Amino acid sequence: MLGNFSYKNATKLYFGDDSLKFLNDELPKYGKNVQLIYGGGSIKKNGIYDEVVKILEANGKNIVEDPGVMPNPTVEKLYEGIRIARENNVDLLLAVGGGSCCDYAKAVSVSVNCDEDPWDKYYLRFEEPTCEIIPVGCILTMAGTGSEMNAGSVITNHEQKLKIGHVFGEEIMPKFSILNPKFTMSLPKRQMVAGIYDIFNHICEQYFSGEDDNTSDYLAEALMKSVIHSSLIAVEDPNDYEARSNIMWSATWALNTLISRGKSTDWMVHMLGQAAGAYTDATHGMTLSAVSLPYYRYIMPYGLAKFVRFAENVWDVCPDGKTDEQIAQEGLKALEDWMRKIGVSMNLTELGATEDMIDGITEATFILEGGYKVLTKDEVREILKQCL
Ligand code: NZQ
Ligand code: ZN
């Protein structure tokens, strides 16, 4: 039975190869001071920075520079962003980049007017903001996280060896996001496929929970098929606009709260991947691909019916003459073959993890209860060992 829920998504999207012009429609809604948030410089190389600055200037905005947001943004960078926003009385946080810039903008947004330490308040105690937030807008340059249309924000604390995501309430979602698939074309192939796997796994995390007949699962299957189809085209020809635009749109729908309605959701691949990420600082999507197969093979017997459905509906496995276990295994083999074809990391060793980290990563793994098996710490350790 579909559970009870509310649904609202407050982010306005502008999609397409001319979508940046709609920044002109959004900017007049906000005050003069715009904190321009970006990463390590890709937007300067591909010209997006110049285009955005031109529009900000034409709208009479005062640009407050906030560069250097690193992949997996750190708590130290968050403190810097809060200081910049406070010193410049910022009215809008404009993130131009991938999920890291969008996530970071949301973390700054909830912290600028808050006296408490944001790491303790939001990432250790998971509290909701009690202060006035600064609005966030995104111009997305990498498809993957869904951060452009959700309220998630992941921050890494290297000192504490923790990478933690907080999913805030809907008021923290970006007010608007501009999605131009052409902006993703300059991504290195490794980042593109890491993003593709991140999208696919977001769908899996929501799909592999519950045993009911749920509309969300049909939506999830359609999204998975679209991602598989478009990814195979994009790895052959990264400049294929149709494939890249389908990937970008799927990313948004994979994690904008729609397909989790009425579902308990799993998220254990992300918990394992994030804990590994805290130790290795590896690319998010690659940490997920590295832990997925040992995890799914382990939980498969506990959610057998769904893994059979996954095999048949997503991977077109023919069930004739096979046991449920055989069908489910074939589905996971098809997933593995696709992962190898697009070229994602298949183990944690290649991401820099070593045997002596396993106890620490186990400790840093949050155990969630929405999937088919609530893992014990010993099971987490065993799965992680298989991921090396
Ligand atoms: O920093 P620059 O120079 O811009 O380079 C970035 C970065 O090195 C580069 N890049 C992005 N767009 C580019 C480009 N290079 C060339 N051309 C372009 N058009 O790509 C690298 C990775 O960028 P990043 O933003 O870190 O990637 P992603 O979008 O995967 O974001 C990862 C972060 O999002 C969090 C992850 O944990 C990680 O911290 N997540 C956020 C979620 C959410 N808000 O709901 C959910 C996800 O599961 C995830 O946990
Ligand atoms: Zn993810």
Image (cartoon, rainbow, N blue to C red):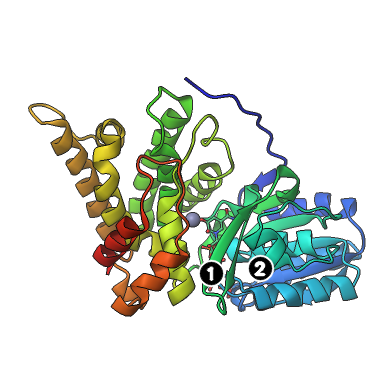
Which residue is at the front of the view, 306 or 150? 306
Q: Residue 238 placed where, x, y %?
A: 41, 61
Q: Residue 206, relative to residue 357: is it above or below?
A: above
Choose top left, top right, bottom left or bottom right for residue 362: bottom left
**Residue underneath mark 1:** 162
In this rendering, position of residue 208 left or right of residue 70: left
Structural crowding at the residue carrying mark 1, measured as other residues with C-alpha within 10 Å and reported as few (<14), some (14–19) or many (≥20):
many
Sooner in the amino-acid sequence: mark 2 or mark 1: 2
Q: Residue 292, relative to residue 329: is it above or below?
A: below
Q: Quadrant of ligand 1?
A: bottom right
Which residue is at the front of the view, 211 or 173? 211
Structural crowding at the residue carrying mark 2, measured as other residues with C-alpha within 10 Å and reported as few (<14), some (14–19) or many (≥20):
some
Distance in Å between CA atoms under marks 2 and 1: 32 Å
Whether residue 292 appears in this view of the structure is yes
Secondary structure, mark 2, is helix
Q: Say what amino acid the circle numbered 2 marks.
A: Ile
Q: Residue 240 placed where, x, y %?
A: 43, 55
The number of discs equals 2
> What residue appears at the point 25 percent right and 59 percent down from the top-left corner?
340
Q: Residue 187 placed where, x, y %?
A: 49, 67
> What residue appears at the point 24 percent right and 63 percent down from the top-left corner?
386
**Residue underneath mark 2:** 48
Label 2 beta carbon less than 8 Å to ligand 1: yes
Label 1 beta carbon less than 8 Å to ligand 1: no
Whether residue 238 appears in this view of the structure is no
